[in-house]
Amino acid sequence: SQTIHQWPATLVQPVGSPLSLECTVEGTSNPNLYWYRQAAGRGLQLLFYSVGIGQISSEVPQNLSASRPQDRQFILSSKKLLLSDSGFYLCAWKGRLAGPTRELFFGEGSRLTVL
Amino acid sequence: SQELEQSPQSLIVQEGKNLTINCTSSKTLYGLYWYKQKYGEGLIFLMMLQKGGEEKSHEKITAKLDEKKQQSSLHITASQPSHAGIYLCGADGRTGGFKTIFGAGTRLFVKA
């Protein structure tokens, strides 16, 4: 069966420090991968998605970047965190079989607090 | 760009009561998803609707997609404390399923 893991689960970082959140998927190949952010009391905002290794699409211009160095690995990074980067970050994957309209499967989430 | 509006934003119901959550899209829906999120956790997939007029059920939760495919409703019958959480609707645009956008969510509280 397929599983998705992201870490760390909780992170407290000072303003101006770097960030690296990692996500890995197991049990599937060539998935579409996603990073979402959920700010307090708000819905999910799509940050990045990837349809293949090295292929990254950015949805919102911001202080963050994403990379996909391996088929099932998706990394969210920042060189210098801002207070506004605080939030709950969710990694997700979607399979490619039987067309693009398929449900997303989400990781457990990473809560980032920037102080 | 497509937007999803959910109503109500929050809901407090007595255990055993029925409730309905709505999701309205600014554009035609080509794939509508309902998820549940427990506070501070990831999203759990509930069901997906694609065809106008389609209706699906999972235990005591029923979701419908209207004929014009621009609105969906989620109905919970005889609510229980285990139903508490955030319900989010998500949608794929016409450009395909590469991007799924979400509504702001509906927070459901169930009083025992």
Image: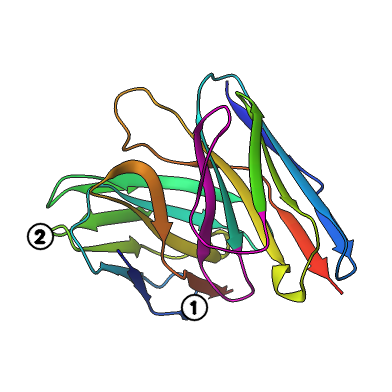
Front-most of B16 and A74? A74
Image quarter (top left, top right, bottom left or bottom right) of the N terminus of chain B? bottom left
Expressed as whole percent of the image width and height from the top left, the position of residue A40 reads: 64, 74
Mark 1 is surrounded, within 10 Å at the Cα level, by few (under 14), some (14 to 19) or many (20 or more) other residues, namely some
Q: Secondary structure at mark 2?
A: loop
**Between tags 2 and 1, which lies in front?**
2
Expressed as whole percent of the image width and height from the top left, the position of residue A7 reads: 78, 43
Residue B59 in sight from this viewpoint:
no
Label 2 sits on residue: B68
Image quarter (top left, top right, bottom left or bottom right) of the C terminus of chain B? bottom right
**Disc on the earlier residue, 2 or 1:** 1
Whether residue A58 sits left or right of residue B68 in the image: it is right
Q: Amino acid at mark 2?
A: Lys
A72 falls in the magenta region? no
What's drawn in magenta, residue-wise? A38-64
Q: In this picture, is B47 found above or below B37? A: above
Label 1 sits on residue: B14
Front-most of A40 and B84? A40
Whether residue B5 sits left or right of residue A76 in the image: it is left
Question: What residue do we see at 73% from left, 50% from top?
Answer: A77
Q: In this picture, is B26 found above or below B98? A: below
Front-most of A21 and A106? A21
Question: What residue do we see at 20% from left, 56% from top?
Answer: B65
